[in-house]
């Protein structure tokens, strides 16, 4: 779907749909309104976490981030996270397999962050219009890239708030 064809639900500050929609690319969301953004920290069995590098044509080109994007109108948070992960990385994780970690409020967006787990042999198929590269890294590399200014700008504040919960979730042993 092209960005010009995307419609988002307008949310109030609590994340409840207002019944109104907003077309991506329009001037600005109404003041005090939000749209839903999702991201997924994907972890392999070996503990590595997936980071993706934004494509050259995107805002914050060539910077690193967790896979994700905006929820479409009518889409639940988990459904949006599953779809965005599949579109950007080729990884298919069912919404029910996503673990919600937390929500971060931005000026006009509410970011829901999830953790998902995949097998170590999971194969990536990158959406080149969105993602130029991907790397499986240990969680400490996320911290180093953040400190070095290599993460996309929105992730500075997001990780300042959410990283302790994300890191805790990534360190919880799981049966595969």
Image (spheres, grey):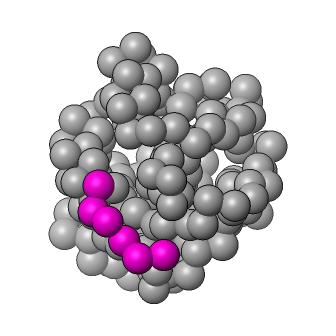
Residue ID at (50%, 47%): 48
Give the residues in magenta: 171-176
* Residue 37 image position (x, y, % from top left): 43, 58
* Residue 40 image position (x, y, % from top left): 46, 58
In the image shown, does 83 or 116 lie closer to the viewer?
Answer: 116
In the image shown, does 75 or 147 lie closer to the viewer?
Answer: 147
Q: Can the viewer see residue 31 in this picture?
A: no
Q: In this view, does 64 lie to the left or right of 98?
A: right
Within the image, what quadrant is residue 175 found in? bottom left
The extreme bottom residue here reads 96
Residue ID at (46%, 80%): 97
Q: In this view, does 123 lie to the left or right of 115?
A: right
Residue ID at (74%, 35%): 132
Instruction: Identify the image quadrant of the N terminus.
Output: bottom right
Q: In this view, does 19 lie above or below 122?
A: below
Q: In this view, does 85 lie to the left or right of 170?
A: right
Q: Can the viewer see residue 89 in this picture?
A: yes
Residue ID at (40%, 63%): 115
Residue 173 lies in the magenta-colored region: yes
């Amino acid at each position: 779907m092209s960005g010009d064809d995307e419609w988002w639900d307008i949310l109030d500050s609590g994340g409840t749909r207002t019944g109104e929609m907003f077309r991506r690319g329009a001037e600005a969301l109404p003041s005090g309104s939000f749209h839903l953004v999702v991201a997924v920290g994907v972890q392999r069995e070996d503990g590595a976490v997936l980071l993706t590098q934004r494509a050259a044509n995107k805002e914050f080109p060539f910077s690193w981030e967790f896979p994700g994007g905006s929820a479409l109108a009518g889409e639940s948070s988990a459904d949006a996270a599953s779809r965005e992960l599949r579109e950007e990385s080729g990884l298919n994780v069912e919404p029910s397999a996503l673990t919600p970690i937390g929500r971060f409020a931005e000026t006009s967006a509410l970011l829901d962050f999830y953790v998902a787990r995949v097998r170590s042999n999971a194969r990536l198929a990158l959406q080149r219009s969105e993602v130029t590269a991907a790397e499986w890294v240990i969680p400490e590399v996320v911290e180093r890239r953040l400190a070095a200014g290599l993460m996309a700008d929105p992730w500075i504040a997001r990780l300042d708030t959410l990283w302790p919960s994300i890191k805790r979730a990534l360190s919880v042993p799981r049966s595969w």
